[in-house]
Image (cartoon, grey):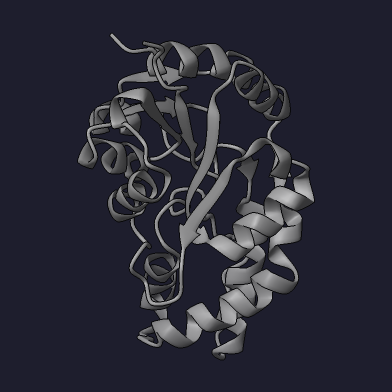
Amino acid sequence: MLSPAPAILLDLDGTLIDSEPGILSSCHAALRALGHTPDPSLDLSAFIGPPIDDIMRVLLEPYGDDRTTEAVAAYRADYGQNGLLLSRPYPGIAEALAALQGAGAQLILATSKRREFAERILEHVGFSGHFSAVHGSEPGGALDHKPELIAHIIERQGLAPDHCVMIGDRRFDIAGAQANNMRALGVLWGYGSQEELEAAGADGLVAKPEDLAAAALAMAAPA
């Protein structure tokens, strides 16, 4: 009996694309919309990965402002118009996705970003054709966090976790995979450090996009 084709779940921000310029721009816009003057030296690289609600809560704290809901709405309004268009694919990712698809793997996007934004970004950077499904957060917040999101993907796509790999750059991706008995591959070109990914318990690490396809396929192979 043939084994099912492996399913490769991929994070978006910090894994496929450098999204920091657009996220930073829209965070500034959100702060200005609430009457604040953004710090021009603001560095968001350590914050990219969790849901935007968590990021905005941290950014508002120095201002003594708890209007997270209003800030998130302002952020999304700007991001949908401007920020997402600033996303840049990492060099070598297009080739890695093509190699995975060519090897018969099913590619599924698993991002904490709103699904509608993720779909538009994939189209913008030319990656849409590689993915069989795109999953992200939805209005209401039920799928904001990776454990719940990955569980939803497994159910919706009918996946066998032991034939899947979750690929991401932050501890949130690793935790989401572990919560669903799925192996996790950490990438070192994104926003999380090697120390963060190792401490989170990643099953493997990959340093360069050109090595991604081989590492993912090897990890997805049944023991």
Can the viewer see residue 37 in this picture? Answer: no
Q: Nearer the viewer, residue 17 or 27?
A: 17
Residue drawn at (38%, 28%) of the image: 164
Is residue 174 left or right of 138 when viewed as pictured? left
Q: In this view, does 205 lie above or below 189?
A: above
Q: Position of residue 187 (x, y in %)?
A: 48, 27
Q: Position of residue 34 (x, y in %)?
A: 54, 89
Residue drawn at (59%, 60%) of the image: 41
- Which residue is outermost to the bottom? 35
Q: Is residue 189 above or below residue 205?
A: below
Q: Is residue 95 above or below residue 190?
A: above
Residue drawn at (55%, 41%) of the image: 14
Q: Position of residue 48 (x, y in %)?
A: 48, 52
Marks counted in the figure total 0
* Residue 101 sits in quarter: top right
Is residue 221 left or right of 214 when viewed as pictured? left
Q: Nearer the viewer, residue 203 or 49?
A: 203
Residue drawn at (30%, 37%) of the image: 177
- Which residue is outermost to the front? 1
Quadrant (top left, top right, bottom left, bottom right) of the N terminus: top left
Quadrant (top left, top right, bottom left, bottom right) of the C terminus: top left
Q: Nearer the viewer, residue 139 or 21?
A: 139
Q: Position of residue 49 (x, y in %)?
A: 44, 51
Is residue 98 left or right of 14 when viewed as pictured? right
Is residue 33 left or right of 113 when viewed as pictured? right
